[in-house]
Amino acid sequence: MKSILITGAAGFIGSNLVEYLLEKYPSYKFVVLDALTYAGDLHNLKKVQDAKNFTFVNGNICDRSLVERIFQHYYINNVLHLAAESHVDNSISDPGIFIETNVKGTFTLIDVAYKYWMEKPFVFKTGFENNRFLHVSTDEVYGTLGKTGLFTEQTPYAPNSPYSASKASSDFIVRSYHHTYGMNTIITNCSNNYGPKQHDEKLIPTVIRKALAGEQIPIYGDGSNVRDWLYVADHCKGIDIAFHKGKSGEVYNIGGKNEQNNNYIASKICELLDVIHPLKKGSYKNQITYVTDRAGHDFRYAIDASKIEKDLGWKADENFDSGIEKTVKWYLEKYKE
Ligand code: NAD
């Protein structure tokens, strides 16, 4: 029976993932380890918290003795690793915690997994042969693109922010445990996610929240920075398929073929709000305002997801118009509370 440790599942993607997996795989056991930092919220796990096959542990992935106890107590035989410091702006003002959590935390987890699952390099303990460590990472490790081109799994790493540098480091640690010790690893590098339960600090929740509060909607620079937006449920499906069908040691890029710049995102949300929740007069667009650009702001990210599409049969179900409408409606409810 699969006993899966999911780290960081009180956050945005992890909480969507655990809901999805619990429903799809009722026979699996899920243990969530989350430190409940400012970005984690137990409320995100409300739907799943009472399930018999779900356990929540409040703790830090850098706490080696805790991680060891979890592996032993719950017979952990698979890991889906999502816990991270995830906000680029915070990594610019306070990079140290990104190195601690994203680099040291990933090392701690995979090293405990190695020692718990394997006798020595390339030799699994009996009964542990199929155990897998899946590391969730980001397209930001590839750096920035100009107006054309796409990130493939072969694109050389060129991280530009302390956040992406810490994620790149964690990817390299996972890679090294495959090559040096023969661990069964998968790395997924995904583009920008959007959808329910994302922290208020991120772009899309900020645009919606500021719009509804009648405040200025801040857009960095001239709003021309481009991201490849993927609805969070499609990312969860990608993680699921990479975990179950991916080949050990492989990297899979996940992305929505949906490149939009920040101006488009802000305008689209305002247009939706103008219809769903109209102002007495005028448009929410009048609240859009341009602020000093983020230091070192990458211009464009865009993913070539053809490997996971062709090799594993993944494809995004949601298009941006349907995904953003669902998202705006979800935050309308949240911010009305
Ligand atoms: P998030 O910030 O919403 O959630 C992170 C979670 O990790 C929180 O619940 C937090 O409490 C927990 N956490 C932080 N430090 C911890 C520690 N030391 N020990 C245990 N738990 C800790 O992040 P997210 O947006 O859900 O991202 C999840 C993962 O996906 C991250 O690894 C991120 O790099 C990656 N990713 C995110 C995106 C995106 O657009 N959000 C895109 C690609 C990849």
Image (cartoon, rainbow, N blue to C red):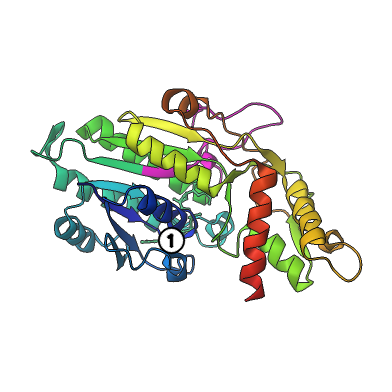
Number of numbered labels in the structure image? 1
Residue at 79 percent of width and 57 percent of height: 270
Respond yes or no on whether mark 1 lies under 8 Å from ligand 1.
yes
In this view, the residue farthest toward the right is 281
Numbered range of the magenta stretch: 135-161
Residue 207 screen position, x and y as percent: 71, 60
Residue 62 screen position, x and y as percent: 30, 59
Helix, strand or loop status at disc 1: helix
Amino acid of disc 1: Ile
Task: Mark 1: give few (<14), some (14-19) or many (20+) Cα within 10 Å.
Answer: some
Residue at 57 percent of width and 33 percent of height: 303
- The reply to whether the magenta stretch includes residue 138 is yes
- Tell me: 46 left or right of 124: right
Q: Which residue is mark 1?
A: 97
Residue at 33 percent of width and 36 percent of height: 244
Residue at 88 percent of width and 71 percent of height: 280
Looking at the image, can residue 53 be seen?
A: yes
